[in-house]
Amino acid sequence: MKIALIHYRYARGGGMDSYLVDLVHGFAKQGDSVDLWVYEQSQDLPVPENVRVHQVKLRYWFRPFRKIALHTQIVRDLRMSDYDLVIGVMRTAKQHININGGAHISFARNVNGKLRHTDAIPIFFEWRTFRQVQLIIANSMKTAAEIEKDYGVPAAKIHVLYPPTNAARFNISVRTEKVELARKFGVDQNKFSILFPSTNHKVKGLGPLLEAFSLLPRDEYELLIAGAPAGKTDFARNVKYLGYNAEMEQLYAACDLTVLPSHYDAFGLVISESLACGTPVLVSKTSGASELVDAEHGIILENLTPRGIANGIIAARQRSFKVDEHFLRNHGLTVEQHVSAIRALAVKEILGDRI
């Protein structure tokens, strides 16, 4: 197939940026001809041979308006008739399939407490996208329900595919080196080590988590924060900030538990990454990724107060988990499975006998 993929940037970054990279390599590996439409491209990120990058120039636009400008230029320049399938990982009308990593209305309400006037533009573009595309792929049942409720989209138009995880990188084999990796990252092996990976600490729940740690014995528990700057440096002695880490699979394997007490999260890719590496999780019920977690994988947090989080950590330490080494494949979460599922949906719902 000849496929166009649309997103803001081709770079390593947050969940949707990493997702696009997986899509590009996944479709290319299956032999598809891929055109990538973006306005930013990381020059140190390899592009497969059968992928062509269209970098839309927006240098004269202020950053807050670049997404609108990109939408306008794609509507002008991209001809859908040139492709068998156009897939958008952003809000734009020119696409057959929209892959949604979280609907804006629910995000704004849960993160900001209410809708603001600045939410009007993204909500409008999202509403128009949902109205015009033929198929919406939501990243969780939670997201699918929010799209249906907030935007009035028929349920038949929405399909749920959980985001994939790179099985070649994130797999349980790395956990066999847990002791060596703990030394590498300075993890105290005499304590129950907990990893908090995040690029948005406010949304992911770092504040309540730090308060929860103040309720736990310092000589028994250790918290490691990975990702965006934490905004402070005067942590308790059993809390460490590690910064961004390019070897997250090793960091997951070095720790005893991954925690994500988000008060809102459309999915939470770190949960499936952690489980792929064999590390159990403590995740809030408000995270879409909790839909994948059962008693063998970890604990779902119902109470997101500091005391509730602390109790969850204590319970996790007392439990014995057994994460399946084939977790990704058993849940259809490999990149290969995900791309094949998109292709199957496209043939069934859009392309029919044309392919």
Image: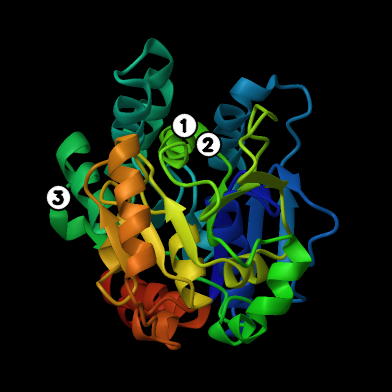
How far apart marks 2 and 1 lie (CA) works out to 8 Å
Identify the image quadrant of residue 140.
bottom left
Expressed as whole percent of the image width and height from the top left, the position of residue 143 reads 28, 49
Residue in the foreground of this view, choosing between 36 and 238: 238
Q: Secondary structure at mark 2?
A: helix
**Mark 2, residue position:** 201
* Marked residue nearer the N-terminal end (1 or 3): 3
Residue in the foreground of this view, choosing between 306 and 22: 306
Q: In the rendered structure, which amino acid carries the disc numbered 3? A: Pro
Q: In the rendered structure, which amino acid carries the disc numbered 1? A: Gly
How far apart marks 1 and 3 lie (CA) works out to 38 Å
Identify the residue at horizontal 30%, vertical 39% (top origin).
Answer: 307
Identify the residue at horizontal 39%, vertical 81% (top origin).
Answer: 323
Task: Specify whether residue 139 is in view.
Answer: no
**Mark 3, residue position:** 154
Numbered mark located on residue 82 in the image: none
Numbered mark located on residue 207 in the image: 1
- Classify 10 Å Cα crowding around label 1: few (below 14), some (14-19), many (20 and above): some
How far apart marks 3 and 2 lie (CA) works out to 34 Å
Task: Specify whether residue 30 is in view.
Answer: yes
Identify the image quadrant of residue 344.
bottom left
Q: Secondary structure at mark 1?
A: helix
In front of the other: label 1 or label 3? Answer: 1
- Classify 10 Å Cα crowding around label 2: few (below 14), some (14-19), many (20 and above): some
Q: Is residue 174 above or below residue 37?
A: below
Q: How many marks?
A: 3
Identify the image quadrant of residue 209.
top left
Expressed as whole percent of the image width and height from the top left, the position of residue 175 reads 59, 81
